[in-house]
Image (cartoon, rainbow, N blue to C red):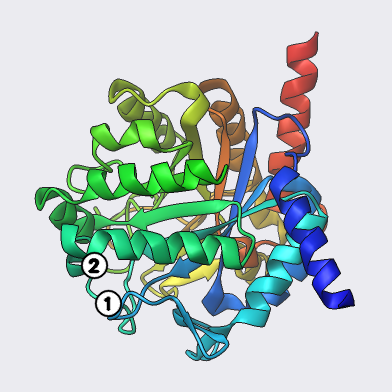
Amino acid sequence: MIKMIIRTLGLVASMVIPLHGSADVRVIGYMPSFKNLTATVDTTDLSKLTHINIAFLNPDVQGQLVADGHMRCMPGVDGESTPVEDIHYLVDKAHQAKVQVLASVGGGVIPACSGDWMTQLEPKNRKQLIQNLVDYVEQFKLDGLDIDLEGALLTSIDNAGNYTPFIQALSVELKKRNKLLTCATASYDGGMVPVDSLPYFDFVNLMSYDAIGPSWGTPGIEHSSYDQAAGHIAIWKARGLTKDKLVLGVPFYGYGFGRFRSDYAYKDILAQFGTDATALDLVGKACTGCSYITYNGKPTIRKKTRLALKEGAGVMIWEMSQDVQGKHSLLKIIDDEIQRYHADSAQ
């Protein structure tokens, strides 16, 4: 009975959680299931976030999301299915800190355990999938869903005429329950969510990173420059995305080339190259055939945060397990810049 009362109170609290800080500024942190959800939420300063996106939720071939105490398709640290206890733990802790929680659906790489999204979103299957997603939101007391269907899959779904009808119908059901619907999108042809879907999202997260990586991009460039962020914002404003819905994504990771390994968390860069690296965006020199690491240090994160506040409604982070604690935390830099921006605006 006591557990039931606690759960009931938690449900009520989740319905009325206000955003801390300024209501018009969002700071969204992705927390991947494959990076240990409980450890990540325990080591993140939740007072500096407004939203957490749990990454990633996918339906199985029957369209089911949960069975036998585990997610049907949400790989954990060791590749095993994420247990329901981990989701409850994260949601409860976030809600205690007045942080809203969404499940991010899809992902850049759809896992093998997932059903076929093209089939799931056909008209004959769409209604049941939407019901399963809404049931999932209610079961875990989530505050909404974030749709992260990307690249060729997104294009194929849209070309089949099934993306916007799915988003529209899902939005109707979530709005009935006072829940959020958001998305993540790239800014290149073939990777952008369709313009006619924009009215149904509460906000849109621009994935302004990955211009180059281990197997793609123009050799010698940076993967997430300030100029790229400004260009992506301009693209989406031209497509009709309004300031109150635009959220700029920033990376807490980098890519290595030449003699360096292929990928680095921000915390790994600091551990290997020292805190002087926090003031830079590069280890080495970015040039064709050169050995270098491209990432975002504190000055660029600060500058991008100011840009996001001027041109949009906040910042999205991929992803929280890659940060450090203390004065060199990139989340702290974002929060400091938000406070400074508000102080300047009040003058």
Q: Are marks 1 and 2 in contact (CB under 8 Å)?
A: yes
Residue 115 falls in which quadrant of the image?
bottom left
Q: Residue 319: x, y in percent?
A: 56, 60
Specify the farthest residue to the right. 2
For disc 1, the neighbor class at 10 Å (few under 14, some 14 to 19, many from 20) is some
Query: Which residue does the numbered mark 1 point to in the structure image?
Result: 115
Q: Residue 336: x, y in percent?
A: 77, 37
Observer-nearest residue: 340 or 77? 77
Q: Residue at x 46, y 45 (%)?
A: 182
Where is the N terminus found, in terms of image quarters?
Answer: bottom right
Query: Which residue does the numbered mark 2 point to in the structure image?
Result: 120
Q: Residue at x 28, y 63 (%)?
A: 289
Say the numbered circle drawn on residue 294.
none
Observer-nearest residue: 22 or 345? 22
Type of the residue with mark 1: Gly
Q: Residue 82: x, y in percent?
A: 55, 83
Observer-nearest residue: 152 or 208? 152
For disc 2, the neighbor class at 10 Å (few under 14, some 14 to 19, many from 20) is many
Where is 194 relative to 79, above or below?
A: above
Residue 212 falls in which quadrant of the image?
bottom left
Marks 1 and 2, how far apart at CA? 7 Å
Where is 49 relative to 226, above or below?
A: below
SS at circle 2: helix
Specify the farthest residue to the front. 1
Sequence order check, earlier mark of 1 and 2: 1
Residue 191 shows in the view: no
Disc count in the image? 2
Residue 171 shows in the view: yes
Specify the farthest residue to the left. 160
SS at circle 1: loop
Type of the residue with mark 2: Gln
